[in-house]
Amino acid sequence: MEYISDQTFDHQDFTISAIAHREFESCTFRNCNFSGCDLSKLRFISGEFVDCNLSNIIVHDTAFQDVMFKHCKMLGIHFPSCNTFNLSMQFEDCVLSHSIFFQMNLSKCSFFASLLDDVDFTESNLSKVSLKECNLVNAVFDSTNLTAADLQHSIHYTIDPDNNNIKGAKFSLPDVMRLLDKYGVIIS
């Protein structure tokens, strides 16, 4: 496996030139296109993706350790297939629509000001995870651990308090009222 460290990749189209058998440490990817690429078995450690298109990438056994994604388009990624050892990802102002986090331990991850439309968090551990200022329209929370999670200023979520652990979770008005939707109560 080729080891690459402390490099910046700017405006590169990785759909044309594949990047197999590599480990990237402290590398930055700016304005790069990875759309549909197979990133299987690659390792990204202490790196950053900024303004990149990572939609529909394949991440079978891919390692993301202390990786930051900023302003990235990340549609339809199946994250449960990635390497979960020391998994740590931060997402800021990203579009993660239609991505899957089924049964994942995301306790070392955070989401800020991101669009999480139709994202599947079924049976995931989001304990103490920050989901601040996110749009969670149609996101699926089913048997999800949201203990002490921070959803302040997030919108459009539907979370069933009877089917998810929300003890100590932080919400803000007015969207916290959505926790009562299933009960059909009228609040005036």
Image: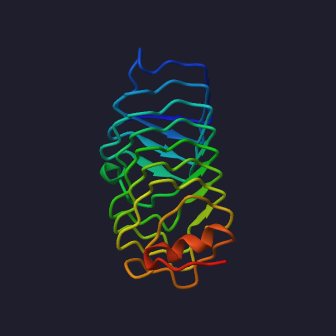
Asked which quadrant contains residue 56, the reply is: top left
Q: Is residue 150 visible?
A: no
Residue located at (51% from left, 50% from top): 116
Pick the residue in front: 161 or 80.
161
Report the residue that reaches farthest toward the bottom: 167
Q: Position of residue 137 (x, y in %)?
A: 51, 53
Q: In which quadrant of the rendered image does the N terminus lie? A: top left
Q: Position of residue 156 (x, y in %)?
A: 56, 58
Q: In this rendering, would 61 be left or right of 115?
A: left
Position of residue 178 relative to residue 117, above or below, is: below
Q: Position of residue 16 (x, y in %)?
A: 41, 14
Q: In which quadrant of the rendered image does the C terminus lie? A: bottom right
Residue located at (52% from left, 85% from top): 167
Residue located at (50% from left, 80% from top): 166
Pick the residue in front: 187 or 21.
187
Position of residue 74 relative to residue 79, above or below, is: above
Pick the residue in front: 139 or 83.
139
Pick the residue in front: 6 or 82.
82
Asked which quadrant contains residue 36, the reply is: top left
Position of residue 52 relative to residue 88, above or below, is: above
Coloring scheme of the render?
A: rainbow
Q: Is residue 113 visible?
A: yes
